[in-house]
Image (cartoon, rainbow, N blue to C red):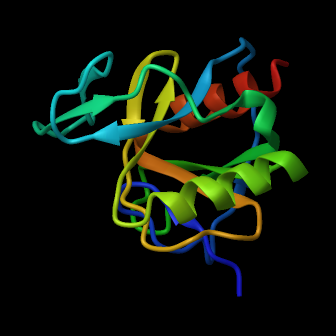
């Protein structure tokens, strides 16, 4: 059974369609650990549309190079929101499994170009090498992330 780490409100990908990518500029994708209380070296950030402060670790546990491919999908829950579907590399899959196993009931921050996009709670170890980034992304934002991950 495929398990997906779901970011923000998205839970399933059923019925989503792949959308074209047209924007081109490299983005810095980072998966970071999160503290809900201030910690040395951690940066205070808030999730877009939220007001609760989170504290993001200074060093990412995963980056662009851990992603083999990505594509934009329309949210199953909103006609105006989009998601980024990620397929990890072999080494990225192993990292993601370890990170999720070690952080059950904790958050993992998704940061793009220094901006916190989402910080979902991990419910269980996630295997299968796939994840979804959601969080009120427009088609343009999701497309920029997808194109920027591959650097095209």
Q: Quarter holding the C terminus?
A: top right
Q: Is residue 22 visible?
A: no
Relative image position of residue 94 (x, y in whole percent): 77, 56
Relative image position of residue 95 (x, y in whole percent): 71, 49
Relative image position of residue 57 (x, y in whole percent): 40, 27
Q: Is residue 144 above or below residue 15?
A: above
- Quadrant housing residue 38: top left
Q: Is residue 108 above or below residue 146?
A: below
* Front residue (pair 119, 107): 107
Q: Is residue 91 above or below residue 121?
A: above
Residue at image coords 75%, 15%: 24
- Quadrant housing residue 150: top right
Q: Quarter holding the N terminus?
A: bottom right
* Front residue (pair 63, 51): 63
The outermost residue toward the front is 40
Relative image position of residue 34 (x, y in whole percent): 35, 39
């Amino acid at each position: 059974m495929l398990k997906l780490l779901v970011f923000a409100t998205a839970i399933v990908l059923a019925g989503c369609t792949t959308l074209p990518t047209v924007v081109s500029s490299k983005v810095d994708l980072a998966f970071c650990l999160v503290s809900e209380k201030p910690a040395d070296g951690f940066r205070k950030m808030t999730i877009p549309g939220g007001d609760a402060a989170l504290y993001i670790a200074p060093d990412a546990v995963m980056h662009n190079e851990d992603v083999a491919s990505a594509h934009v999908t329309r949210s199953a829950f909103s006609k105006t929101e989009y998601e980024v579907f990620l397929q990890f590399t072999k080494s990225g899959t192993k990292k993601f499994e370890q990170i999720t196993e070690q952080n059950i009931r904790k958050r993992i921050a998704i940061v793009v170009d220094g901006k916190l996009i989402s910080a979902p709670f991990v419910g269980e170890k996630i295997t299968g090498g796939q994840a979804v980034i959601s969080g009120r992304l427009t088609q343009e934002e999701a497309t920029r992330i997808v194109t920027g991950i591959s650097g095209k």
